[in-house]
Amino acid sequence: MCGIIGYIGKRQAAPILLQGLRRLEYRGYDSSGMAISDHSTLAMTKCVGKIENLAEKMKTSHLPGSVGIAHTRWATHGGVTELNAHPHTGNKGKLVLVHNGIIENYRELKDQLGPEHHFTSETDSEVLAHLIEREFDLQEQKNCEGLRKAVGCGLSHVKGTYGIVVMHEDVPDCLITARMGSPIVVGVGKDENYIASDATPILAYTRDVLFLDDGEIAEVKENNVRLFTLKDEIVSKKVEEIHWNDEQAEKQGFPHFMLKEIHDQPTVFEDAIRGRFNMAEGTAVLGGLNMTEQQMRDINRVIFIACGTASYAGMVGKYAFERLAGIPAEVDVASEFRYRDPIIDEKTLVFVMSQSGETADTLAALREAKRKGAFVRGIVNVIGSTISRETDGGTYIHAGAELAVASTKAYTNMVTVALLYALQFGRARRVSIATGQRMLNAFLEIPEKMNWILSQKDSIKEIAEKYKDYKNFLFLGRGINYPVALEGSLKLKEISYIHAEAYPGGEMKHGPLALISEDFPTFAIMPQNQLYEKMRSNIEEIRARKGKVILIATQGDERAKELAEDVIYVPAMKELLEPLLNTIPLQLFSYYVAVALKRDVDRPRNLAKSVTVE
């Protein structure tokens, strides 16, 4: 969950690395550091805290040179200290390494290295630096090839996950990078090349990239990139083009990335559905499914596997698959899936959902599902990510670069793709053309209705400021709006640090009602759908106990005002598509509460965007 950036070329490396770290700060922000070579010596600086602390420190640090690596850390092994910050050096201080991942056997490796190795940090990463430096000292060739072989030999002893970049004072003309379970991207430029943990920091310089797969290692020079396996076999791979541009990764005048990304939703929703439905046939057309209609009809179970926000998108997919396709569906938290011996077979369709496409738990679940013979399909955002490469098909959600830690537009587009898949299966099995066409027409109305909700943001801001000092919140929804309540609760926790819980409305009498008081407000979702009266009764129970209520209600529902201190209206929508609209007020509410409390909205404490370790 850390960020890596490396550069080799003719320009000064420090400004490029620093800017890259700023772009990667969503991956880690406990500490940061960089090491730069001027082709004769290595210089290094580190700092605790945010990237700007490092930038300030560098004003008095002279770090010339055109080769360098840098890192922003989210602590796993060892506390947040300058000694634990990356880069780490080997025993002699000549080899420098940055690492993302977890080395599970680092204690054993430390013991094997012996007492002559002196460690200055508490991290597992430093052990890697010592191990690879020792292997380099044993190599006859003291050049780039020798350094690559040393990295390969060192990593052969490692158990765990890693994305690493290595440089050595005696080999100033190359960087070595390798991956196992933690993403690495090589950016290919003209007489310069880049290495990063994802494409975001290199988009300002090149869109041509090589994605490393697990077990691959690369020699990166300023005018050449060579790929190998860890067994020293040559790998041939085509350069791919990333279609995101640098401008998409900027705030575009918004005070925070999160607010920008909330406002991106009408546009990226259109990107998610463009070219993916056939109105004449009343069906979605997601070619990445890679299944025949007979295979689709043979599926007797669907499982959505995901973590956090993505799992709530999967819950919406569960409701939609059961309603439209008549297929039993369930949602599994990825971190639990492979530890409970799941019962799946060749008639099971598994969707793995992840914004980054690199989520460690989801990747492990993907591999377990494939081993058991299921159809496994990915729903991801990042092109070329590991999940997209390891599944046998799937769909990109086309949300564009999402830089705030708290997911907004990626969640919306995951929901969109799950709904489209449900319609595609529904039409193959039991949904009529007319019903399918009505669904598709409703999809086409979504962007305009999203924009209408966004135009109400000032009134939502007023409500948020009114409730910012409450310490507890309850979120309620029923049916397909229950996952919306879960997502609203998560957003408030993530960026405001306010305790929040979410329940189905019908569960109130089974325990949670005991929590209700004047100091424990409820945010309820009550659109005019088949569960309207049921939900209304649940809210009446809260009102009877003097609980304060904020309500999301359908535009024109005047009765809603009888139940709540505050009402946020949303346009009417077909029930299965309601989450696409009802989530936006919850995102805005959480955002404005966090701003009022002066939280770091884009970089909430203890969290990172891409969870690449278990």
Image: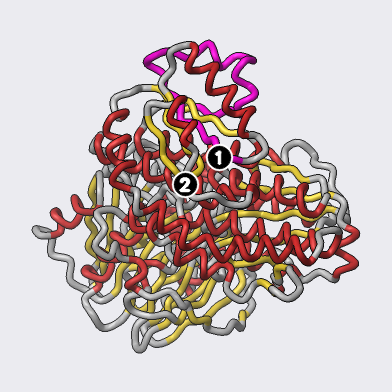
Whether residue 149 is visible, yes or no, is: no
Count all numbered tags in the image, as a single digit: 2
Q: Is 92 situated left or right of 400 in this image?
A: left
Amino acid at dot 1: Pro
Is 511 magenta? The answer is: yes
Dot 2 or dot 1, earlier in sequence = 1
Residue at x-position 47% and y-position 43%: 556
Colour scheme employed for the rendering of this structure: secondary structure
Give the percent coordinates (x, y) of residue 451: 41, 58
Is 498 magenta? The answer is: no
Whether residue 221 is visible, yes or no, is: yes
Q: Residue 55: which disc?
A: none
Q: Is 536 situated left or right of 84 in this image?
A: right
Q: In 3D space, how far apart are the residues under numbered discs 2 and 1 (Cα atoms)?
A: 8 Å
Q: Residue 527: which disc?
A: 1
Q: What element carries label 1?
A: loop
Give the percent coordinates (x, y) of residue 139: 49, 70
Give the percent coordinates (x, y) of residue 586: 43, 41
Q: In which quarter of the image is the C terminus?
A: top right
Name above or below for residue 238 compared with residue 559: below
Name above or below for residue 509 compared with residue 377: above
Q: Of residues 257 and 559, which is closer to you in this image?
A: 559
Give the residue pinned by disc 2.
570
Residue at x-position 76% and y-position 36%: 340
Q: Of residues 497 and 224, which is closer to you in this image?
A: 497
Q: In which quarter of the image is residue 169?
A: bottom left
Q: Give the range drawn in magenta.
A: 501-528
Residues at discs 2 and 1 in contact (Cβ within 8 Å) = yes
Q: Is 283 situated left or right of 514 in this image?
A: right
